[in-house]
Image (spheres, rainbow, N blue to C red):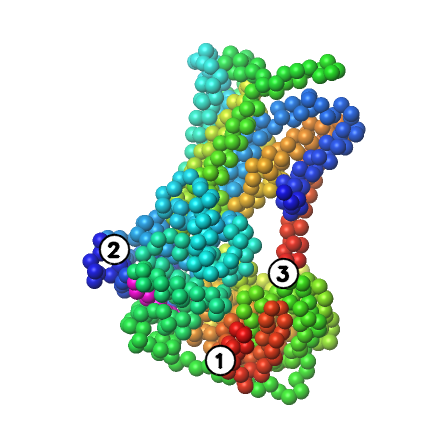
Amino acid sequence: MKLDLTRNETLVAGVILAFCAIAAVVDPGFLSMPTLTDLLRGGIVLGIFAVGAMLVLVSGGIDVSFTAVAAFAMYTTTLLLVNWAPGLPWWAAFLVAMAIGALLGAFNGLFIAGFGLPTLIVTLGTLSIFRGFLLTFVGSKLISNLPPGMRDFSRLMMVRGTNADGSFYSLPWAFAFLVGVVVVTWTILYRTMLGRAIFAMGGSMESARRIGIPVRATQFFVYVYVGTMAGLAGIIHASMARVANPFDLVGLELSVIAAVVLGGARLAGGYGTLTGTLLGVALIVLVRNSLIVLGIPSTWQSVAIGILILIGTGLPAWQAKRAAARAA
Amino acid sequence: MTAADEPLIVMRGVTKTYAGIRALDGVGFAIREGEAVSLAGENGSGKSTLIKILAGAEEPDEASITVAGESFARLTPRQSAGAGIMVIFQDFSLFPNLSVAENIGFSAELHAGHRLVDRGRVRALAARTLERVGVDIPLDARVETLSVAHKQLVAICRALASDARLIIMDEPTTALTEREVRVLLGIIRRLKADGVAVLFVSHKLAEVLEVCEHVVVLRNGRKVAEGPAGEFDAASLARHMTGRDVAEALPSPLADGAPRLLEVRGLSKAGAFADIGFELHAGEVLGIAGLLGSGRTPLAKALFGLVAPDAGRVTLDGREVPLGDPLAAAAAGIGYVPEDRLTEGLFLTQSILRNVGIGRLEAHAQGPLLDVAGLWREAEEWLRRLAVKAPDPAAPVRSLSGGNQQRVVLARWLARGPRMLLLNGPTVGVDVGSKAEIHGIIRDLAGRGLGVVVISDDLPELLATCHRILVMKEGRITDDLPGTATSEADLAHRLAS
Ligand SMILES: Nc1ncnc2c1ncn2[C@@H]1O[C@H](COP(=O)(O)OP(=O)(O)OP(=O)(O)O)[C@@H](O)[C@H]1O
Ligand SMILES: [Mg+2]
């Protein structure tokens, strides 16, 4: 394949490689299984969020409420299980959380597809509503004694081992969910007319309407889908953290959207790839996990991420402009 | 099933009001199988509105539409497509982010009820359709990277890709040159022979009279004339459309010893044009004719700095104009009205006044503040001079009819008072009456000492406005002809040979 420097994916992949190279020079222990499993583990929840966020961006909208949906679904499910059905297996808990996520997503969808309101405004509103409702009516106390089903899930390991220096590393089965989400989303986006309709709407909403794409139904689907993904990410987050904290997750939404934009999705809609999204997430997790290795204080994290976004989105745009001027 | 003599589509009393303006007022006519009907009318007369209603893209206030014996009060896009109505929209309505193949195949796949994507099937369909139209566009190219002409061809292919019973074409030839227009007219003839009905809108009256059996004329949202095409000629059609006689004047002779304004020497750009040299005098209108791909558009872009040439120099009033820098070109006094005005030239959601005034902010600055009233007055004056048909200058540009949107772009550049203007297709999509008016404006501007370069496919237009015509072929200037002493046939011959 030809190296295309106007693509974000190439650039992000390059930055990731450069970052790893520098880290490996500074800390020879950097290139090791523990680093890799930490990176993969750190990418599970962010990755699922990012895939959902990308789908919305591609459809020409934006969703900032998904973290609140995730927190709501995660906490409510845990509370339900603890109080009424402690014996339920983990997969039943997952289904409940996804159903709650879908329901909240449908609430977004109702306002956006049903009443035709702007997506940013609706989801900014529901972000506050979901969070406020959760903390006021459902509960605001940490649940650290998770139901047994969820505890079981957190112990399921895909890979487990010991490094030469005696340190442990492991990768939980939760990672398989990220893979599953990517596969399902890829299939929808590239193998179904529904997915193509999502791309088409992002390209031009008016054109999509004119050729008879059911834009409302498609939009509704998009928001239900992100809601479901958020519910899943939420319950995985609680299981892995072994605690259901209603104050968690909210606040991550901009980092997630940043990762997606870094991976080449456009805020104006119609553009975005799963590869790019995952690379964007990888870069952000890498920066979070390893700035310390490079001897950079963690308070610089957000500055570093900001710089990456500026370069990562600015450079391809600038190159595309130059290419256009050259091409006549 | 329709009885043999029953029309395919019958419209009655179609009425549509936009914010108090009657865009359509009780329009009704019928279209038969295998018949091409021309819908003619000035800019803003309601043609596109009627088409959008047939396509299901707009909801009529009132209407009765019978399609193959089934009656509707309004159509949805699905019903319309389901009934076999395919539309080439005036603004193309393509998906810029999708590939050529997907754009062409999308409607067909959607209405065939497929739920899964079969890329092979889509590509085969797209390739077949492109071949029918006789053009070669890479199937995997993103539509946003295409030239306007190619975008228009993709829009045409999309409508042809499905098995349609009625194909509606809203100004399908605005960006095409003679060769593609010929092919399209040939396709229309074949469609008719296969029993497909065609509703055709075009401001190029010669085309209209060539392929259509039946003509319907709209004026201000009302049907003012209807009849077999044989009963109309270009002049009578123009008279029905405008309600008056339209006459073209000739360019006034160029004054002797007019100072040299623009000088272009050895301008080259690999793959686009080579060794271009010409001069333009103050008060002169210079035409550039050339087929698609002859390099005329890259040349115009290069003169305005949108394309960086590899070699050559451009001087305006004896001062060298920096190449490859549109801001410097604009500052030097060059104005450029692009070919693709609907997508390159306008802020569609912004008001008409803002679109006109945007280039004049500096001129109306009073210290750090803006003389808004003065800016608006000037913009309104230009809207009036170009006879833009806008109910409310504060309305967004997107609410204007296609032809009126074009005038807004023209108004913006004229308001800047440039030394010279590059007009790439100045009257594309503009009706006959206004076309004559715009030609009058061009002559008038030249009369005041402005240099004007007109790039156009419309040979009569070049002959009616230009003092001199350059013919471009394969990136080079092959002829330099005096405008008044050249005939249309001669010019067409030189272009084609
Ligand atoms: N979305 C809209 N909102 C408000 N007014 C509109 C809208 N669309 C069209 N109009 C108005 O309806 C009238 C008819 O417009 P239409 O686009 O049908 O004209 P047209 O005959 O296609 O003209 P043209 O030859 O310039 O394409 C115009 O006065 C236009 O300003
Ligand atoms: Mg129109």
| Cα–Cα gap, marks 3 and 1 | 31 Å
Q: Badge 1 is on which residue?
A: B489
Q: Are marks 3 and 1 on the same chain?
A: no
- Which residue is identified by label 2? B68
Q: Nearer the viewer, mark 3 or mark 1?
A: 1
Query: What numbered label is drawn on residue A121?
Result: none
Compute the Cα span from label 2 to label 3. 48 Å
Q: Residue at x 21, y 62 (%)?
A: B5
In the image, is residue B486 part of the stretch drawn in magenta? no
Residue B419, percent across and down? 64, 74
Image point (58%, 18%), residue name: A158
Judging from the image, what secondary structure is the residue with disc 3 in?
Answer: loop
Identify which amino acid the numbered label 2 is placed on: Ala
Range drawn in magenta? B34-43
Res B482 quadrant in image: bottom right
- Classed neighbour count for the residue bearing mark 2: other residues with Cα under 10 Å, few (<14), some (14–19), many (≥20): some
Chain label for disc 2 = B
